[in-house]
Structures are given as C-alpha cells and as structure tokens.
Image: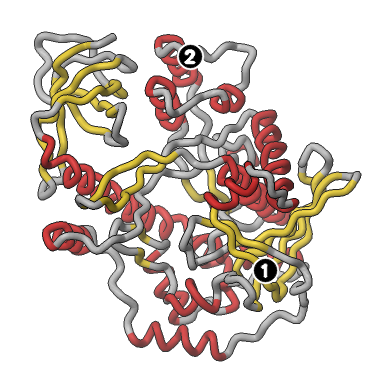
Amino acid sequence: MTQPRIRSPRPAPTPDLAELLLGLETEFDVPAPFDQQTLAAAEAAVANLDLPEHDATNIPFFTIDPEGATDLDQAMYLEKDESGYVVNYAIADVPAFVELGSKLDDVARQRGQTFYLPHRKISLHPPLISEDQGSLLPNEVRPAFHWRMTLDTQAALVNVELSRARIKSRAQLDYASAQKSLDGSSKDQQLELLAEIGALRTQQEQSRGGASLTLPDQEIEETSNGYKLVSRVPLPLENHNAQISLLTGIAAAQLMLKAGVGILRTMPKPEDKALTDFRTQTQLLGHPWDEKTSYGQYLHTLDVSDPKQLVIMHRAASLFRGADYQVINSQPEEELIQAALASPYAHTTAPLRRLVDRFVLLTCSILTENQNIPDQLRTALEELPELMRSSSAAANRVNKAALDLMEAVLLQHRVGEEFQAIVVQGQRADPESKGANGQLQLVDLPVTGSFSGPGEPGTLVTAKLVLADPTKRQISFEIVVQNS
C-alpha cells in the first residue's frame, strides 16, 4: 500500500517559510548532509565498480516515474504470448556500490530511508549513487538485478528467475505523459501490456482477499500568489505499475520463505469486530459493502472524488494497522502475511530509497545462486526490523509536521472564512462536549483539520476556520451548520 505524502516542485520558499522549513529539519533531527568521508566513499565505490558478466543490454527496458525523478530504482520490459506473460523487471543493484560493513553501509543504516520534505529531498545514499551511477537512467549501462517472472494468461505467477546483469534502459517515461499516450490514439505496446497485466494482477489480488488502497496525494503547486494545495488521485498507470512492484515483492517473499531465511513486510489481519464496524459505516455513508462482494472488489468500486466515499477509503486504511518487518525464523506462514495484500510480501523494489530492499535483493540473489547466506548478512537481517521501525517513525513524524505546516501557511490568510466539509471522525451531539472532538476533511481543498462542536462521521457541514498558525503548525475549525 502506498502512503500519501507531500509532493512539491520545490519552488523557492518565502523567507518566513524557508525559516520554518529549516526549523523542521532541526526539530526532528533529520539526517545531516553527507560528510566528505561518505562522499569520498561513494566516489571510490563508483571507481571500483565491476559490472556483472551477464549482459542484458539487448532488452529494451523503460522506466516510468513521477516527472523529474532522478533516483530511478526500476525498469521493465513486458512480453506476451499464447501461454501468458513475461515480466522483465530490472532493479538497481545498490549492493554493487554499497558493500556490507563499508562506510556507505554504515551511513545508510543510520538513515534508513530517503526523507521527503516540501523544499528538498534528503537521500539515503549520496547523489552520485542514488541519482547518477546507481540510477537506471536512460541510455546508460547500469548494474541491476534482473527479475524474469513468468505469468499465466490470468497473470498468476508461474516461475521466477533472478540474475545480476548489466542493463540499458531505452526510455524514461513519466506517469502523466504515459497515461495521456495510453488514452490517446497513439499506441504503445509496452504501455498497453502494462495496463493489461496490471488489471489482471489487481484481479489476482482481489481473488486472494487483498486490496491496494488508492488515497489521494496532497501536492503543493506554485501559483502567481505563492502556493496552493491540490489533491491528486493516482493515475491508472500508477496503480498498474504498483502491481508490478507488488508482484516482485511477492516473488521475493516466496524465494525467501522456501529457503527459510530473509525479511518480510508483514501486517496482521483486522479483527472481526473491526470489519463488522466498517461494514456498518459503509451503510451509514451511503455506499454499503454487501456480503457477496470481496473486500478488495468493494474498495475498487469507490470513487474518492466523492467526499463520503473518500471517508470510507480512509476508514478502510485504518482497518489494517501494525505493519512491521519480521525476520523469517521458522514461524508459521500465516504469521508472516501482509494482510492487506493477503500474501507474504517483501519490500524489494526501492533500494535507492529504502534500506531494507538492498538486503532483500542480496538475499534473493544469493539464494538463487544456491549459495549459503554469509553470517554478516544474517546478522544484518536481524538488525533490520528495528532500524526500519526507527527510520519510518522519524520520517512519518517529519512528514506529518511538514504537511501540518504547509496547510497552516496556505490557510493563514483565510481565518474567519467558512468552508464546506465532511466529518471524518467525530462524536455525537453532546452538550457536555468541549474543545476539539474530531477531524474533518474540506470538500474543495485537500485539507484535514480538527474541529469543535458535535459532528457525526460522514455528515456534510459548514465549518468556519478559527485558527491557522504556521509557527504552531495548527489549524482548527468550528462547525456552524450541520448540512446533512
């Protein structure tokens, strides 16, 4: 599942905003710039790089990412015949640059992942690796893990082959342009296959009882007067591309489970009562989930541009809590399931931006070569869950603070105005209730804030903005009219 996060073209902020953004970095102790020793280690790693013997540069891979991305982890080339499909998926070979026990390994373990702030990106690895020599940029020969996954006609996984190879991407696509091309008259066979396989993999997911949530991203856009917040629902091609990534994570999990070694991304199933309550809430919100429809199929019917259905999607996201990392250690497989996907799963496809993926790739590669997992790698696997929990908590804290800040900045001149909103979390009318007692979502702006006064979840209201304080990163509303 993807989590919504701020995306921004990173325009130059005003002096006041720049000071507040820099304050976030100090307050939340985000990673400092790379020191000279680390930068020198990256230069040495690039200079000493040995490309893999296996040559896959004849495969016309392509990448598809947000516009302007430079840290390109994945490239693909898709095939179809009468027996089904072949997904060629190349993932950046970060272990080729970052050796276990090296200076770069130590720094990456301290960081855990790339941090995204409105004004800048704080990378997991030095830019020479993450945005240049290790990135699968077009028309450049790069080391990669080449996954060759065979699927049947319904896109069920049949066979997996993995090798380290040198590859050469032929094109760097962005989602918006690719979606426009797919929807237009010009035909691109690779994009058509991506949509075809992605749709079939979504059906596979639903048949397992899983579901990928589609929540809007909050984005910051530059305007003539400063900034504005917009809500952007992922394009269909983004969801299809995500299915290829999920497929690879499922394949990696299968490899590691068979060998009894590795690390998985897990999530417990929701309790029966939580599912029953969710079903009741869908009825109250006017889009009931009936007994004949699977959870995944039901979520696929939701239109998040409808405020009430957006509330349902948020409620669905809250069903699945407790995501974690677990080292494989003879547990029953049912304890290692990622419940939202209804399958064992491993973070595998973003090694330039997330620490754990590098170790998953290295483990899978060693296993497919029928070699023993070295003690140094086994020790690292045991340490990874805590490292990832710590870095994820830190990234989530600063991401939330950044979003709260930007919402307050963008609304600070609108205190006293009234907005149409839908109550996301609230309480029944209670004369004894005081202070903020719930959360609401504005209808015309991608802003969520606290409110005072009674409000039933799912009801449309008129709310007056009573506070927007960038220094405190707080916004709050007062409900003045219950519309429905």
Q: For residue 369, which quarter of the picture? A: bottom right
Task: Name which residue lies at 48% across and 72% down.
Answer: 130
Along the horizontal axis of the image, is 113 left or right of 326?
left
Along the horizontal axis of the image, is 444 left or right of 272?
left
Q: For residue 145, which quarter of the picture? A: bottom right
The residue where tag 2 is placed is: 287
Can the viewer see residue 394? yes
Residue 464 in the image: above or below residue 96: above
Q: What element carries label 2?
A: loop
Q: For residue 482, which quarter of the picture? A: top left
The residue where tag 1 is placed is: 170
User: Looking at the picture, which amino acid does disc 1 mark?
Assistant: Arg
User: Looking at the picture, which amino acid does disc 2 mark?
Assistant: His
Give the CA separation, mark 2 to mark 1: 45 Å
Where residue 148 appears, as percent x and y from the top left, is 76, 59
Where residue 294 appears, as percent x and y from the top left, is 62, 21
Residue 484 in the image: above or below residue 415: above
